[in-house]
Image: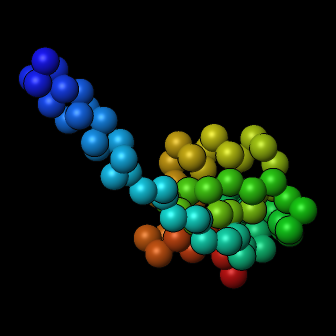
Amino acid sequence: MLPIFLATAALIAPAAIVTPAPAPKPAVNTTCPVTGEKVDAKSPKMTVRGQEYYICCKACSPKLEKSPDTYLKKDGTPKNAK
């Protein structure tokens, strides 16, 4: 009975230690990272690498998610930002 208890405890214990992911940094971009079109607080939003970005339309979301290095600098700034 004791080995079963220890095995079960070992499986349960790691789940109790998991901490929630930090909240993403809020979006501040004024142009869509994918198209360069103007965006604002009413635009769709998505999160990439812990940073929120406004995008011009839902079609840009999979592009930015699939290839963030194409659209974002290493520091997270959109490459097309002015």
Residue in view at x 63 percent, y 40 percent: 62
Residue in view at x 28 percent, y 43 percent: 14
User: Quick one: which residue is furthest to the left in this view?
Assistant: 3
Pinpoint residue 64: horizontal percent, then vertical percent: 60, 50
Q: To which quarter of the image does residue 28 belong?
A: bottom right
| Quadrant of the frame with the N terminus | top left
Identify the coloring: rainbow
| Quadrant of the frame with the C terminus | bottom right
Residue in view at x 86 percent, y 68 percent: 41
Q: In the displayed structure, does residue 5 sit left or right of residue 37?
A: left
- Residue toward you, 70 or 75: 75
Pinpoint residue 45: horizontal percent, then vertical percent: 75, 56
Q: To which quarter of the image does residue 55 belong?
A: bottom right
Pinpoint residue 79: horizontal percent, then vertical percent: 58, 70
Q: In the displayed structure, does residue 5 sit left or right of residue 30?
A: left
Q: In the displayed structure, does residue 3 sit left or right of residue 50?
A: left
Res. 74 in view: yes
Pinpoint residue 37: horizontal percent, then vertical percent: 81, 63
- Residue toward you, 30 or 10: 10
User: Quick one: which residue is furthest to the bottom in this view?
Assistant: 82
- In the rendered picture of this protein, how many numbered marks are placed on residues? 0
User: Quick one: which residue is furthest to the right in this view?
Assistant: 42
Residue 82 drawn above or below residue 37: below
Residue in view at x 20 percent, y 35 percent: 10
Res. 7 in view: no
